[in-house]
Image (cartoon, rainbow, N blue to C red):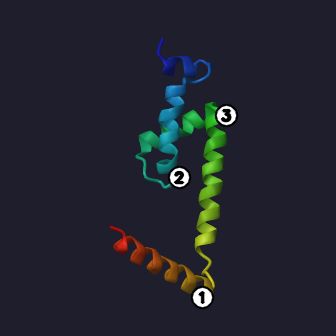
Amino acid sequence: MTHEADHHMGSDPSLAECADFLEQIVYFLDNELDAADCSAVRIHLDQCNPCLEKYDLQRTVKSVVARSCAEAAPDELRQRVLLRIRQVQVEIRETP
């Protein structure tokens, strides 16, 4: 019996199977998978709690980052960061 057959009969998915799905989670969250792959990821997440937990974590992180990116940094902070970037660029150019 294949891992897929075992999985559908209620046994835990293999680590390799989970690794494959975990790689696809980012694309799934960004709606970058075709319908068949989306369906396969949904089925796996419905049957695998560890992967579902990792999916929920990724979704939460993506949401927090998206919210954070909507805020503008204070102008003073932006100027300090830009100055530091220029300093590092000069140091890199001067390093033999």
What quarter of the picture does the C terminus occupy? Answer: bottom left
Across and down, in percent, residue 69 comes to 58, 72
Residue 55 or residue 35, whichever sits in front: 55
Mark 1 or mark 2, which is nearer the start of the sequence? Answer: 2
Q: On screen, 29 above or below 21?
A: below
Disc 2 secondary structure class: helix
Disc 3 secondary structure class: helix
Residue 54 or residue 91, whichever sits in front: 91
Q: Which label belongs to residue 75? A: 1
Q: Amino acid at mark 3?
A: Asn
Across and down, in percent, residue 47 comes to 62, 31
Q: Amino acid at mark 1?
A: Asp
Mark 1 or mark 3, which is nearer the start of the sequence? Answer: 3
Across and down, in percent, residue 30 comes to 49, 55
User: Based on the displayed image, in which of its 4 quarters is residue 68 positioned?
Assistant: bottom right
Is 21 on the left-hand or right-hand side of 50?
A: left
Q: Mark 2 highlights which residue?
A: 29
Q: On screen, 19 above or below 88?
A: above
Distance Cα–Cα, label 3 vs label 1 = 44 Å
Mark 2 or mark 3, which is nearer the start of the sequence? Answer: 2
Label 1 Cα crowd, 10 Å radius (few <14 / some 14-19 / many 20+): few
Q: Are marks 3 and 1 in contact (CB under 8 Å)?
A: no
The residue located at (60%, 37%) in the rendering is 45
Q: Amino acid at mark 2?
A: Leu
Q: Mark 3 highlights which residue?
A: 49
Label 3 Cα crowd, 10 Å radius (few <14 / some 14-19 / many 20+): few
Q: On screen, 46 above or below 96?
A: above
The residue located at (44%, 40%) in the rendering is 37
User: Based on the displayed image, in which of its 4 quarters is residue 88 positioned?
Assistant: bottom left
Is 93 on the left-hand or right-hand side of 71?
A: left
Q: Which label belongs to residue 15? A: none
